[in-house]
Image (tube, rainbow, N blue to C red):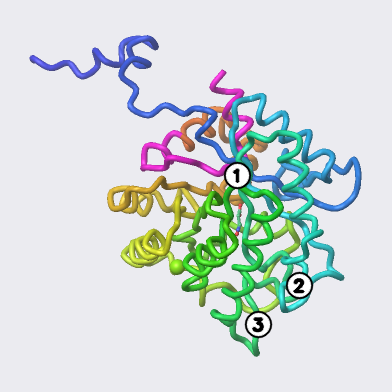
């Protein structure tokens, strides 16, 4: 025997020396759920250990994340029911909760990279990512609102807008409108390959944004397809996306790898709410070691090609990494 593969696994020191994939705090994007009010910290029932915060607590959380080495947050707001409609009116309100949240975080932690969710579902009386006509989610009218929404976030101080809607052509429309208003330093993180997935369930509880009718299969992708993910992603890059994203993560590592091999922009994964809930549930039952599961899963996502990982485990992971 001339090659003893186990030599490189002999001790923790040797294993650390030859590890190919190393997680660091700057890999993580921490999603934040923001709600109106003061001193609010509400645990999300289907996401134990994860919370909706009012603005004051959101700012505190952002400070803590920054002090831990986490460099970016992705903002989602819970819109009051009475402000929801079919036009995305609240989405473009310059004094809306999202806009106030962006300002508050940038004031408190100016270096924090603030990314904002751009889609209509939290603001939609139908819980859909776009404008609804009959049973249809209308593409081009939605794109127009998404571009105005992005401009609005840019004006409030967002560093990146993150369109998560899967309408066609929205990256180009957003880039063009940002350029027209001289926001040439605001980036776009495109949810390029976002699959119609059951793993978003807990998130919809968090924002009370479940679709009121039908499902999202006419705009989000069919999980049977991989080539389509490449088509979507290459188009987003062409339209000006600075970062592209695959979502969810764990059931889509093959997609992550294929995309990583085909683009030169950074690729992000979104390790979604249902993936978080699965680990939490199994750990609570005593069926899985939560800490080990977190590191194994996040490392595998990075190994598959993710440069960035949006994950509800961001803080836990940083603590585990020591
Ligand atoms: N745009 C965000 C989602 O659609 C869901 C994320 C999650 O389930 O964590
Ligand atoms: Mg697309």
- Which residue occupies the extreme bottom position in the image? 134
Q: Quadrant of ligand 2?
A: bottom left
Spatial CA distance of label 3 from label 2 is 14 Å
Question: Crowding near pointer 2: few (<14 within 10 Å), some, many (20+)?
Answer: some
**Tag 3, which secondary structure?**
strand
Q: Disc 3 marks which residue?
A: 132
Q: Which is nearer the N-term, disc 2 or disc 1? A: 2
Measured from the top left, where is residue 179 in percent x and y? 53, 61
The mark nearer the N terminus, 1 or 3, is 3
Residue at 74 percent of width and 55 percent of height: 98
138 left or right of 222 in image: right
Residue 26 in the image: above or below residue 47: above
Say which residue label 2 marks. 89
Magenta span of residues: 299-322
Between marks 1 and 3 in the image, the one whose residue lies nearer the viewer: 3
Q: Residue at x 52, y 72 (%)?
A: 167
The reply to whether discs 1 and 3 touch (Cβ–Cβ < 8 Å) is no
């Amino acid at each position: 025997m001339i090659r003893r593969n186990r030599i490189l696994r002999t001790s923790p020191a040797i294993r650390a020396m030859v590890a190919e994939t190393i997680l660091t705090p700057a890999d993580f994007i921490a999603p934040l759920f923001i709600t109106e009010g003061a001193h609010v910290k509400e645990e999300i029932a289907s996401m134990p250990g994860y919370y909706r915060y009012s603005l004051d607590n959101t700012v505190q959380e952002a400070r803590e994340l920054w002090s831990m080495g986490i460099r970016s947050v992705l903002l989602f707001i819970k819109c009051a029911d009475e402000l929801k409609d079919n036009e995305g009116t609240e989405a473009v309100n310059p004094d809306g909760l999202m806009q106030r949240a962006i300002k508050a975080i940038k004031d408190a932690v100016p270096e924090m990279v603030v990314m904002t969710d751009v889609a209509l579902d939290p603001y939609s009386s139908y819980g859909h990512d776009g404008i609804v006509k009959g049973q249809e989610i209308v593409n081009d009218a939605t794109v127009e609102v998404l571009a105005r929404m992005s401009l609005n976030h840019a004006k409030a101080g967002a560093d990146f807008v993150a369109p998560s809607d899967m309408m066609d052509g929205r990256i180009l429309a957003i880039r063009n409108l940002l350029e027209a208003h001289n926001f040439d330093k605001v980036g776009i993180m495109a949810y390029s390959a976002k699959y119609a997935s059951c793993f978003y369930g807990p998130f919809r509880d968090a924002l009370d944004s479940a679709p009121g009718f039908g499902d999202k299969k006419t705009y989000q992708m069919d999980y049977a397809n991989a080539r389509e993910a490449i088509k979507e992603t290459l188009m987003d890059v062409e339209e000006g996306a600075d970062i592209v994203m695959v979502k969810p993560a764990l059931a889509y590592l093959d997609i992550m790898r294929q995309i990583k091999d085909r683009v030169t922009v950074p690729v992000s994964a979104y390790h979604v709410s249902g993936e978080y809930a699965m680990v939490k549930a199994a750990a609570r039952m005593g069926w899985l070691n939560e800490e080990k599961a977190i590191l194994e899963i996040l490392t595998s996502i990075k190994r598959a090609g993710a440069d960035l990982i949006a994950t509800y485990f961001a803080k836990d992971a940083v603590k585990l990494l020591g």
